[in-house]
Amino acid sequence: MMCGQGDQIEKRHGTAGEAGWHVSRYLIWTTVPGTQGIAVANLFRGTCGMCSPLEWALLAEADDLPCDHPFVTRFVQRGLVVNFDERAALQTLGRAACAIPHGVSLTICPTMGCNFDCPYCFSTHHGKKMSLQVQDDVVSLAQRMLDASGAKKLSVTWFGGEPLLAPRVIESLSSRLISLVEQRGGTYNANIITNGYLLTQEVADMLAEAKVQHAQVTVDGIGATHEATRRLADGSPTFDRIVANLRDNKLGFHVHVRCNVYENNRCEFDDLRAFMERVARASGNDIACFPALVRDNAAAGRRGHQVDLVRGADMGDLLVFQRVRHFGPARGSFCGAHSLWDVGIDEQGRLHKCWEAVDKPALSFGTAHDWNPADPIATASSPNNLTKFLNTAQPTSDTECLNCVWLPLCAGGCPYRRLFESKACVAYKDDPQTFVRALYAQTHAKKETR
């Protein structure tokens, strides 16, 4: 006997447990200083709220409460009590993520060349730019993907290498892709990942015209701290010029300033964030700063400039700050590597399933000239390079992941690391209280500003 589905419970006799209801397996919680309540986050539904001591006590006994008890109804509406297998739902969502076309996403590398020499960069740089023939192939691929998916949305990320070494490729391809989507009555948006060194006013105006809405610019600290890792290939400094580009130019898009955090600069992140807030106020530009941890970095070792990686539990506080900003309902997938409709394209037109693979031809699964998602296996030159990424959408064979409360949040972690390095659990895995406390503080702050 079932009490009902979704957020509604029919008035029936018996206990909630007898009717199939049980406490969600994906709840984490903590006490909140200065209150008597318990902050509870549901990682499946992507919600966070407060339970009173009475609610918390009754939640522990929810299975034995009468089916029509008002607290059971309240728990169901908040997702604290469910009547389905959430883990099975995650596996279904993971499979669906591979095929359901929410939109088409292309990560395009107009060049793999770069003017920087950063010690932790995973890319192998060379100076070729995307030819006109490959640009034609990219437009044709976008058309095939939109046709096969039926999607009305095309998203583009400009990547590399340093994409602003090839601004004319960005300008030309953007115009053609925008026209392709507009002819179909669809929507187009773009973003760019750049070191910011070449972000002049002329280039910024071009990017805005190309419908770039977000730019990610990496700054690893203030002054000499930044120069220690973010320098030109000839060793020249870059900090002053990047800051001048962000401060002195009028940027028609939002800028995320990424700080790659490692042992030697982690104590300076708050100073950098405050510095960038001042740059934003002085310029009138929309600029925000966020941390990204450098850890287990094989690239640094290969390049011979090993940075001091942030390790173990020391990463937790910064990663919590980063993750709670993007907290939301479980989707069953972790990144674009899980979707058939999300591909990376290098300057030669080779297709890849991961940003960290775009410089590795051996991991390409096909070409923009030949691959057709309507027949994805037959038209792939290396089908295994496609399927092995897609099949990480849910780690169904990993008992540890299947039994982990964090599964809705991480979906088994980075597919590239899982396939080629080692599984990386969330750094705050053993400290859910810190995560919930930060999440509740963020949620509470948003409510107060409404």
Image (spheres, rainbow, N blue to C red):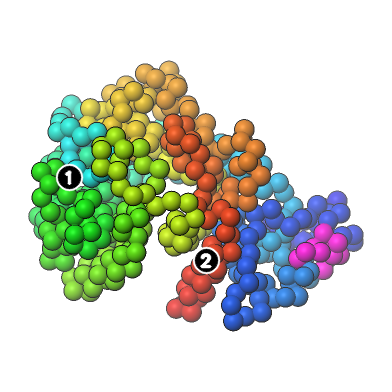
Left or right: residue 222 versus residue 370 is left
How far across and down, in percent of the image, does residue 197 sit?
15, 52
Judged from the image, the secondary structure of the residue bearing numbered disc 2 is helix
Of tags 1 and 2, the one toward the viewer is 1
Q: Which residue is mark 2?
A: 439
Q: Quadrant of residue 377?
A: top left
Identity of the residue furthest to the right in this view = 13
Write the residue at 54% across / 51% down. Answer: 409
**Residue type of the residue flagged with mark 1:** Phe
**Residue type of the residue flagged with mark 2:** Leu
Residue 25 part of the magenta segment: no
> Circle 2: is it few (<14), some (14-19), or many (20+) Cα within 10 Å?
many
Is 210 or 223 nearer to us in this picture? 223
Give the mark count: 2
The disc at residue 116 is: 1
Q: Are marks 1 and 2 in contact (CB under 8 Å)?
A: no
Write the residue at 57% across / 59% down. Answer: 431
Judged from the image, the secondary structure of the residue bearing numbered disc 1 is loop
The span shown in magenta is 59-69
The answer to whether any part of residue 18 appears in the image is yes
Is 211 or 241 nearer to us in this picture? 241
Q: Quadrant of residue 291?
A: bottom left
The answer to whether any part of residue 171 appears in the image is no
Write the residue at 23% across / 27% down. Answer: 348
> Circle 1: is it few (<14), some (14-19), or many (20+) Cα within 10 Å?
many
Left or right: residue 256 versus residue 447 is left
| Measured Cα–Cα span from mark 1 to mark 2 | 36 Å
Residue 67 part of the magenta segment: yes
